[in-house]
Image (tube, rainbow, N blue to C red):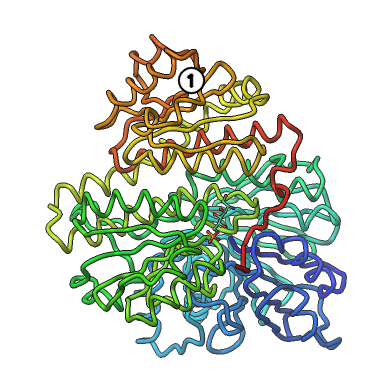
Amino acid sequence: MCGIFAYTGNKESLPILLDGLQSLEYRGYDSVGIYIPNAGIVKSVGAVQELKKKITSTMVGTSGIAHLRWATHGEPTEVNAHPHVDCSDTIYVVHNGIIENYKELKEKLISLGHTFRSATDTEVLAHLIEHQLKETEDFELAVVASLHEVKGTYGIAVSYKGDPEKIIAARLGAPVVLGIGINKYFIASDASPLLRHTKDVVYLRDGDIAVLTPQNYRIRTYTDVEVIRKKQVLDFDVEQVKKDGYEHFMLKEIMEGPQVIENTIRGRLVPEKGLVKLGGLDAVNEQLRTIERIIIVGCGTAYYAGLVGEYMLEEYAGIPVEVEIGSEFRYRNAPVDKHTVLLAVSQSGETADTLEAIREAKRKGALTLGIVNAVGSTIARETDAGIYNHAGPEIGVASTKAFISQLTALALLTVHLGRQRGMSIDVGRNITKELKLLPEKIQSVLDQRELIYSLAQKYAGSRDFLYMGRKYNYPIAFEGALKLKEISYIHAEGCGAGEMKHGPIAMIDTEFPTLAIAPHDSVYEKMLSNIEEIKARKGKVLAIATEGDIRLTDIISDIIYIPQTLEMLTPILSAVPLQLFAYYTGVAKGFNVDRPRNLAKSVTVE
Ligand code: AGP
């Protein structure tokens, strides 16, 4: 997610703005920018350090706005960096969020004679305000009138050359915190940059518009009703703030699950027609109609996401799929041609093995697609087209929110390709409608944190663990085992439940517990039998089951329930308790769950 920061007061603004940006850097740093009224604007690709190299001492002023970008629309270039400005270089905007109707607004503004410089959605805001300012001749009214036209989410700060001390901020769906000092006021995406200036803050609510001057601040609604928001006093340190008060980034990112799915599906569902809109595939849509097979490539968690995608795409789009580990595919001489799609799944977009697999497939003429979280990353740039996750920066080394976003993106791709290939409108409607319900269903899983915490305490002493699942949850068995071993260092292995009798069951005894993923799906009865087989050998079993399941309670006591959903979407729900279980186990064992030993967040080497 992006970070915004703004200041107005009686001190030099440049050092305050740069310091604020430094505190927000964990939110993402594809690019960065700063504007000080009547002193100029400076932008840079990369982190704050890069910006500082371009700053001159002439940037003098007592107010300003600043921004750190985690790109969602438009590559991370200097032109796309915020602040964005209008035609007359008088209105400057920094924005966190997504303007869903930016294309139609941009067309309208271009028809009114506006010229755009960037590929971002944010720039439409600067031109809207410029247009409204001509009508209202009032900065505040122009901002309010502009926001009425916007659909989507925003946390913004706006500066106007004609009223240099004033900062106007607004919030809808993206956090904005107002910092209150003595003759100094701040706007920020979270409290981290405020702590060194003030502990008195107001968290704006959706629909709030704040007007700041060095003398005071006012909060109003769209309809100019003044609102009094309760002041709060910050009582935690900077590091905690970056984690929004959670103890670790990993937990914060697991808890972001509902919002992450919202962001992944936002603007992409057309439930009434049983369709999806994937703008990133527009350029290759006709080519996609003729493909004959898909090779999904990824590493680690991304590879397991690909395995789930195989079940989805084969069952609902009727396309033959194989899934490959990047480090193997790149050295195999796989038969690949122009009728093959190589679909790379990667959170960072920089994993060397996955990248080389793409290059190998391209050399053989394949169409290459990416499902990537980091906008503008190498894999995003080197694939022919793709789908961005919009999951926001994932700081914890263990991939959690990105994984459920990858599964969601694969479900969107399945509907897209399936509806090109005979998937009925009803099936398309069922899947798209169920995708809309996922955020609240994930929340109901997260609400069981206490139970999962207690199960982690109970099993944290285990030396070994077996995870078993079938069909759509076969990959989740492996992903759950990977989470446990990379966070708690317990030896855990995934297993197809049907494979138990072919060897793994020999390991089972009272000291070798099993986690069984057994939702109400087409292989539920088979899973029950596998659980019985383990119980018969005195093996302990924890299970993931569907809410309302009564048969499992007859045979085991440690059960975590997930809501009913379509079988193809159960992995998105069943993965979440396994992430929490691994997290709480790692914490119980006293390990650094955000930075597990020997691991790196992005494996950019072979
Ligand atoms: C998952 O928890 C691990 N951090 C690791 O397996 C990761 O998924 C893998 O390295 C792939 O990374 P990517 O998604 O950035 O390509």
In percent of width and height, residue 319 lies at: 22, 59
Label 1: how many Cα within 10 Å (few below 14, some 14–19, many 20+): many
Left or right, 286 with reference to 542:
left
Q: Is residue 92 above or below residue 115?
A: above
- SS class, disc 1: strand
- Outermost residue on the top side: it is 554
Left or right, 142 with reference to 311:
right
Q: Quadrant of residue 536?
A: top left
Left or right, 363 with reference to 372:
left
Q: Is residue 168 above or below residue 398?
A: below
Q: Quadrant of residue 471?
A: top left
Q: Which residue is mark 1?
A: 541
Q: Residue at x 52, y 62 (%)?
A: 97
The answer as to whether callout 1 falls within 8 Å of ligand 1 is no
Q: Quadrant of the N terminus?
A: bottom right
Please count the marks in the image.
1
In percent of width and height, residue 535 lies at: 44, 14
| Residue sitting nearer the eye, 57 or 451 | 451
In percent of width and height, residue 285 lies at: 25, 73
Q: Is residue 208 above or below residue 552?
A: below
Figure quadrant, ligand 1: bottom right
Q: Residue at x 70, y 65 (%)?
A: 5
| Residue sitting nearer the eye, 595 or 490 | 490
Can see residue 204?
A: yes
Q: Quadrant of the C terminus?
A: bottom right
**Amino acid type, callout 1:** Val
Q: Residue at x 55, y 51 (%)?
A: 225
In percent of width and height, residue 371 lies at: 42, 63
Can see residue 135?
A: no
